[in-house]
Amino acid sequence: LAKTTQPISMDSYEGQEVNITCSHNNIATNDYITWYQQFPSQGPRFIIQGYKTKVTNEVASLFIPADRKSSTLSLPRVSLSDTAVYYCLVGDGAAGNKLTFGGGTRVLVKP
Amino acid sequence: EPEVTQTPSHQVTQMGQEVILRCVPISNHLYFYWYRQILGQKVEFLVSFYNNEISEKSEIFDDQFSVERPDGSNFTLKIRSTKLEDSAMYFCASSGLSRYSSGANVLTFGAGSRLTVL
């Protein structure tokens, strides 16, 4: 399983864009990159997933360079409710295989 | 939006007792999982389950733990002879992907069951 490295924490202010970069130098050909969000005392919640280039949904964008050794989650115009821990996970997507959560990035959005 | 439902939301038990945590996965999902998160620590994989069998398990998932799908809707985690260090949030998750189809696996997690062992 590819190991991921991401910042421990980030502070931001309401209305700003937050970009969290995750390094995964040993990503395998079959691996997908998935981001989850977790609020205190709640289960992780899927945000976005990608394999290469750029993926965008109603919540976030995910930028993946050609070498796929890193990825950047972009949260546009954050609000206080976006304060959470964000996890970058890399895996081959085979159903049933475990997802390994790292320490995540704790994002604090300030007023 | 379909949800994974977990009960109880909080259980307090005495050390040495057995607990059963219950989960109702999303109805058309095929794979089921248990994870746990000790307070302030990482989310840790325990076990995955498919077609009435354990698909993969971690080193944490020893003989103290067992999983079962007793009927068509419930998925349970049994913890025998609980220890203080079993105190944690236990998350159930499910995913809808067949092992034999392409694509990427996305898990839907429940809200968790908080287990407190005294």
Image: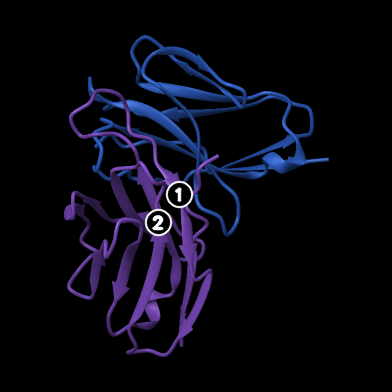
Cα–Cα gap, marks 2 and 1: 6 Å
* Chain B tint as drawn: purple
Q: How is the image coloured?
A: by chain
Label disc, if present, on residue B36 of the rendered structure: none
Tell me residue A110's x, y (percent): 78, 41
Number of other residues with Cα within 10 Å of mark 1, as a class: few under 14, some 14 to 19, many 20 or more: many
Tell me residue A82's x, y (percent): 68, 39
Tell me residue B43's x, y (percent): 41, 54
- Tell which of B60 and B102 is nearer to you: B102
Q: Is residue A8 left or right of A26 when viewed as pictured?
A: right
| Amino acid type, label 2 | Cys
Against B109, residue A90 (above or below) is above
Q: Residue at the location (23% across, 23% down)?
A: A30
Q: Residue at the location (23% across, 69% down)?
A: B66
Q: Chain of mark 2?
A: B
Against B45, residue B64 (above or below) is below
* Chain A tint as drawn: blue
Q: Are marks 2 and 1 in contact (CB under 8 Å)?
A: yes
- In which quadrant is the C terminus of chain A drawn? top right
- Tell which of A13 and B37 is nearer to you: B37
Residue at the disc numbered 2: B92
Residue at the disc numbered 1: B109
